[in-house]
Image (tube, grey):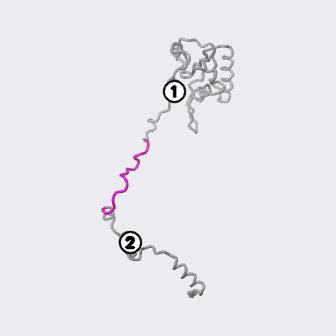
Amino acid sequence: MAARRRGLTPDERELWSRIARSAKALHPPGKPAESHREETTLPLSEKAATTPAAFPRFRVGQSSLPSNPASVRVQSPAEWLADAAPRMDAKAYKRMTQGKMRPEARLDLHGMTLAQAQPELMRFVLSCHANGLRLVLVITGKGRGDHGPLPTRPGALRHQVPHWLHRTPLAPVVQQVTAAHYRHGGEGAYYVYLRR
């Protein structure tokens, strides 16, 4: 059995009439509401013909980057160090990069972890500078590709050592860092030219 609807009380009627008086019509009084419905029921082709093109033509993916991962190549440390301008005498720089200058001391970081290598590098460079040495060799190794479950960059030391040498406390004593000549280890080692 359906429940009977309750009628409005006099207070509710009075409230409803106040709200109805303050409401504004959605459609102007002279224009019937039906014209809006007719306008929206036009076929799509007729609508497109009547409305002007407000937006430029758009093609999906027009501003996306190319999906070829080989096109985005990160420079190796040796490449970005070679691109840096020399901060030392040009003749000495040329002799150094050609492997004609003999390093006065060498440090082999090969096989160390990053945590072991950083303090060792700092100690070595600062002591060499204190002893008045100019050209030292830091051997990092080229690094091997570790094919574990997570992708890792080969040669963590090879990538990190130039950054350490360009930050304090080593930056004030280091004048130039460049990849070593193949006789002294190639990309697996760095020449570090110290300030006086």
- Name the residue: 54% across, 22% down: 187
Magenta region, mostly helix, strand or loop?
Answer: loop
Image location (x, y in percent) of residue 141: 58, 23
Which residue is at the front of the view, 187 or 82?
Answer: 82
Could you tell me which secondary element the residue under label 2 belongs to?
A: helix
In this picture, is 177 found above or below 2?
above
In this picture, is 46 found above or below 129?
below
Residue 80 image label: 1
Would you call the spot at circle 1 few (<14 residues within 10 Å), some (14-19), or many (20 or more)? few
Residue 36 image label: 2
Q: Amino acid at mark 1?
A: Trp
- Name the residue: 44% across, 42% down: 65
Give yes or no for residue 61 being in the magenta stretch.
yes
In the picture provided, is 133 more to the left or to the right than 184? right
Lower sequence index among marks 2 and 1: 2
Image location (x, y in percent) of residue 2: 56, 87
Residue segment shown in magenta: 49-65
Q: Nearer the viewer, mark 2 or mark 1?
A: 2
Q: Is residue 83 visible?
A: yes
Would you call the spot at circle 2 few (<14 residues within 10 Å), some (14-19), or many (20 or more)? few
Image location (x, y in percent) of residue 161: 60, 26
Place residue 47 in its image quadrant: bottom left
Q: Amino acid at mark 2?
A: His
Q: Is residue 3 visible?
A: no
Which residue is at the front of the view, 24 or 130?
Answer: 24
